Amino acid sequence: MKIGFIGTGVMGTGVIENLLKAGFEVEVFNRTKDHAKKVLDSGAQWVETPKALAMQNDLVITMVGYPDDVKAQYYGENGLFAGASEGKIFMDMTTSTPTLAETLAEDGVKHGVAVLDAPVSGGDVGAREGTLTVMVGGDEQAFNTLAPVFEAIAGRVNLFGNAGLGQHAKMANQIMIAGTMLGMSETLVYAKRVGLNLSDILTTLNGGSAQNWSLENYGPRILSGDFKPGFYAKHLLKDLRIALDEAEKLKLALPMTALAETLYEKLVDEKQLGDEGSQALIKLWWSKA
């Protein structure tokens, strides 16, 4: 199976490198070729347009930033659909909107292409180590065809049903992540203020019922002053907005998620820290603790 890949950011780079290690031929496209240098040095091949990727590969994966970025790769004279042909599979691993996932799947049918929505969880660590959790919506036959691909990049993969349900599953994930990020931040601020040894606090809490992925993975980064993005703060804000938009359609109140959106808006829009990792949320309180 030849694989095309669009998006060589923090997450995409890890996924591409694991595909290469598993023996897949991988061609890549990115808006800026310089940002693809790491994977090109690892053996991926550069292609000039999404259209060319679609023409030359059995599977094309997109993993970009925002829903508008997804649309830009699929549509237009040089987009993926322009190079599509019967039997190809496209898979969008961007965290995007369920509505767009449904539209892509419907338009894929017109070109004889199965389009899966397959957002992931696990951050830069999961992408690098090939242990991502993948939440998939779309055609079951196409999903089964990609079993060797998932084996190379993921620790857990679930097909949730029709197109769009993968994105809904990711929204459920991001709602939980929002809660743990707020909890971790307040935990460390409180512990710092009362003079507790923060390394000991991390060890203790991660050994009990307070353990969670955010505390275990982002807590040590905060203590070492590492705010580099494993997952961009601006992207978590985007996800929270999608989740709240979907909740509004469903007439659901999500007060904790709404609070998280407000705080990440302050971090991203007011503090201009959107290009830092999502753990930078603690900077709203850290200096005053």
Image (tube, helix red, strand yellow):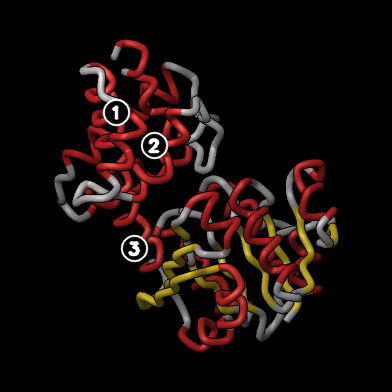
Label 2 amino acid?
Gly
Any part of residue 71 in sight: no
- Residue identified by numbered label 3: 169
Answer whether labels 1 and 2 touch (C-beta < 8 Å). yes
Q: Sort mark 3 into few (<14), some (14-19) or many (20+) by Cα contacts within 10 Å.
A: many
Q: Is residue 53 above or below residue 180?
A: below
The x, y position of residue 36, in whole percent, is 77, 48
Q: Earlier in the sequence, mark 1 or mark 3?
A: 3
Q: Which mark is on residue 188? A: 1
Report the residue at 47% width, 61% height from top: 119
- Please rate how many residues cluster around mark 1, counting C-alpha atoms within 10 Å: few if below 14, some from 14 to 19, many from 20: many
* Residue 34 image-quadrant placement: top right
Q: Quadrant of the C terminus?
A: top left
Kindly identify the residue that appears in the image at 79 percent across and 73 percent down: 25
Q: Earlier in the sequence, mark 2 or mark 3?
A: 3
* Quarter of the rendering containing residue 219: top left
234 on left or right of 22: left
Q: Which of the labelled discs sits on residue 219, or is there none?
A: 2
Choose between 9 and 85: the one closer to the eye: 9
Q: State how far apart marks 1 and 2 are (Cα).
A: 8 Å
- Which numbered disc, 1 or 2, marks the residue that appears first in the sequence? 1
User: Real-space Cα distance between discs 2 and 3?
Assistant: 25 Å
User: Which dot, 2 or 3, sits closer to the camera?
Assistant: 2
Report helix, strand or loop for mark 1.
helix
**In contact (CB < 8 Å): disc 1 and disc 3:** no
Which residue is drawn at the image coordinates 51% and 38% (left, top)?
232
Task: Report the amino acid beneath label 3.
Answer: Ala
Structural distance between the alpha carbons of marks 1 and 3: 29 Å
User: Which residue appears farthest toward the top when viewing the image?
Assistant: 288
